[in-house]
Amino acid sequence: MSKVAFHTLGCKLNFSETSTIGEQFLKRGYNIVDYNESADVYVINTCTVTENADRECRQIVRRALRNNPDAYVIVTGCYAQLRPDEIAKIDGVDAVLGSKEKFNLFSYINDFEKTNLSCVHVSPTEELNSFSSSFSSDADNRTRAFFKIQDGCDYKCSFCTIPLARGKSRSANPDEVLRESKQLLDSGYKEIILTGVNVGDYGKSPAYNHNHDHVHDQEQEHEQDQEINLYRLLKRMLEVDGDYRIRISSIEPNLLTDEILELTANNKRMCNHFHIPLQSGSSKILKLMQRRYKTEDYSKLIFKAAEKIKDLGIGVDVIVGFPGETEQDFLDTYNFLKELPISYLHVFTYSERANTKAIDMPNPVDHAERKRRNNMLRILSEKKRNEFYKKMVGRELTVLFEHENHDGYMKGFSSNYVRIKHSFNPELINKFVKVKIAEVDEGICTAENLSTNETANILAG
């Protein structure tokens, strides 16, 4: 049996799409092996956000060829869409597939015989208008599914190449979302994480026919003529009976509506956790970034959400070292974040990207200074996480336990994205369990007073 191995860079969306590509190989009788093992075919799914993407891609290709010098190497994904000619010049790369082509890999490659020249199949950005559904799970088997419902982006952030790499915003058909999410639940998944490039934009510029499905039959009459959006999709998904919960992977602050906040506050199946990108706490820098809100808008949203939803966990994306970011601008960001009721940060160091407005902006920040600012915010993130976790001590939280045995402990996430551990008990795997938080130990909460009679259907109703 032929073997294939995958390496994925970047976001959870990329991982879900790699899983879909893997299905193409499985249907053709391939065996999927670890990337560090010898395989006949290696597929590398790339990312534009990753720093030093070219160097990293070369290193990953070399790793594959060390395992099998005769292997066929395919590079796809966002970086392949933007820089196909550069990738084609990397020694050992046999095929480069763009963002559209990766979902029809076998249509472009007849056999996996190495040649002296790389074959390149990359559609222009303006042709990236179709939607391919995908999902993947954590390494914990059938517990949490990352389910893609949206792709592309219409925003024009000055630092970002994703609109070039993935095209305009487009959405999955809501009927298909319902059907596939039910299949995920039927196959044993207990948490569905909705992913996309801009999930909050769901329903806008759909890849399906607008007339196909305006609104579910059970919607109220005054909604009959309104188009589907994320809020209405969530309402439809929540009509399904069962023991499950839904999490939104990330949502732009201008798209997190009062309706979604109310739905989250009033439905136990909605995770009380949002990841809301900020990027900068300086109004000046936000304007240079071409973001769609001001710091006061963001602050108002965060405090409103935290007040409305009990024990809400909030994650934040932030970029340091953007061109023109002075020490005062950075301190404005630091102090802004320090005062917000958030639970953790994802900190990114700005790096120059070709074909973006930001690359030509004056006053670049020294690389050493970018690193210093990054470290400061990472420390702040740990403080925020620790503060949030300590607030959970003594509280009852519902945790979904995963499969792995970590030296006698099992781990899982609560609805509000608190990492929790408890002594390993196989009967609790992939079940919702109410636990009491005893203490915070090295960045994780320890659970006690496990009540096994509350493991079934605690989210039902």
Image: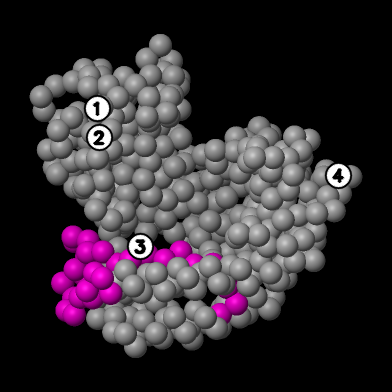
Q: Which residues are magenta?
A: 340-369
- Disc 2 marks which amino acid? Val
* Rendered location of residue 274, percent (x, y): 58, 64
- Disc 1 marks which amino acid? Leu
Return the mark for residue 154: 3
Residue 452 in view in this figure? yes
Task: Give the residue at x 26% y 64%.
Answer: 351
Residue that label 2 marks: 61
- Disc 4 marks which amino acid? Thr
Residue that label 4 marks: 452
Q: Which sits in the foreground, 348 or 162?
A: 348
Q: Earlier in the sequence, mark 2 or mark 4?
A: 2
Q: Earlier in the sequence, mark 3 or mark 1?
A: 1
Residue that label 1 marks: 65
SS type, badge 4 = helix
Q: CA distance from mark 3 to mark 4?
A: 47 Å
- Disc 3 marks which amino acid? Asp
